[in-house]
Image (cartoon, helix red, strand yellow):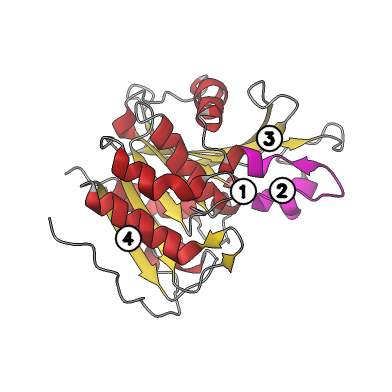
Amino acid sequence: MSRFQIPTPIPGPFTFGPDSQRHPGVPRGSVTAHQTRSSIFPGTIRDYWVYVPAQYDPATPANVMVFQDGGRYVEEGGLQRVPAVFDNLIHQKRMPVTVGLFVNPGYYPPVTPGKLAADNDYNSGARRTGWVPSTDCMSNRGVEYDSMNDLYARMILEEILPAVGERVRLTNDPAGRAICGCSCGGICAFTAAWQRPDAFSKVLTHVGSFVDFLGGHVYPTLIRKTPRKPIRVFLQAGSNDLDITQGNWAIANLQMAASLHFMGYDYKLDFTDGGHDMNRSGAILPESLEWLWRKD
């Protein structure tokens, strides 16, 4: 095997391509908003959205892709625009028929009684972007996303997916399940697949926080010391990412890529001169999804 080579950062700026835009004649999937309480993270409430493609046929179980900080990814005019990208790629048969599950981190009351994710204060406020305002309630994001255990994966598998499965027929095949996130949501996506490769086989991380919040900095060594798992990983990272007490994000992502390379994983690294943001990941989302869902 060839040695891992540190890539030269791809320069910006990064802009949306046609696959991130709406086009006449492309069937449009539906998006519905929901809210749930968790017993795995007791006392938490979370908002989530479900995208169902127009091509969904209940006779055939659909693939599913989970997004952390889901409000950021589901926004029609946001930095990812996943529903539009899914519509275009599924229509072009560049990815399979896939249900999108956009899950926000849990939060603790107090909250305004009777308010659901579809209500105006959610659609215009911080929860829509995946962040919970401290004046309203307390977020459980750090615990859920940065922990190295299987609790978040269990919450998705035991609480969210069964609820969605009551309305949409989803596959149980890990080859038809992917998970994605940005920053701490990125390490959360990797942890879910690492802990449960029987449930998730595809991982997409955007400027993932593989640093020492709750021990995530050990992953590069852990990957090298653990028999290879049946997961495919796309890492998007930037050379001007954060550099703080808990670690250097750019170096951490390069170490992740080097370890995945060393162990012979099916992985891809996109390394730019970008920072800790969604600019590059949104611009290349169509290409990264096509790579992630390819059949070979």
**Relative horizontal placement of residue 125, taking residue 50 as reference (left or right):** right
Amino acid type of the residue tagged 4 in the rendering: Leu
Q: Which residue is mark 3?
A: 46
Farthest residue in the left direction? 1
Residue shown at 58%/44% (left/top)? 214
Task: Report helix, strand or loop for mark 4.
Answer: strand
Q: With respect to residue 242, does 178 lie above or below? A: above
Stretch in magenta: 121-143
Amino acid type indicated by mark 3: Arg
Query: Please, what secondary structure does the residue beneath circle 3 have?
Result: strand
Query: Is label 1 or label 4 in front?
Result: 4
Which quadrant would the N terminus be assigned to in this image? bottom left
Residue position marked by numbered label 1 in the rendering: 71
Q: Earlier in the sequence, mark 1 or mark 4?
A: 1
Of the two numbered discs 2 and 4 in the rendering, the one whose residue sits closer to the viewer:
4
Q: Which labelled disc corresponds to residue 269? A: 4
The alpha-carbon separation of the residues under discs 1 and 4 comes to 25 Å
Provide residue 163's location: percent of width, then percent of height.
56, 22
Mark 1 element type = helix
Instruction: Give the percent coordinates (x, y) of residue 246.
Output: 59, 58
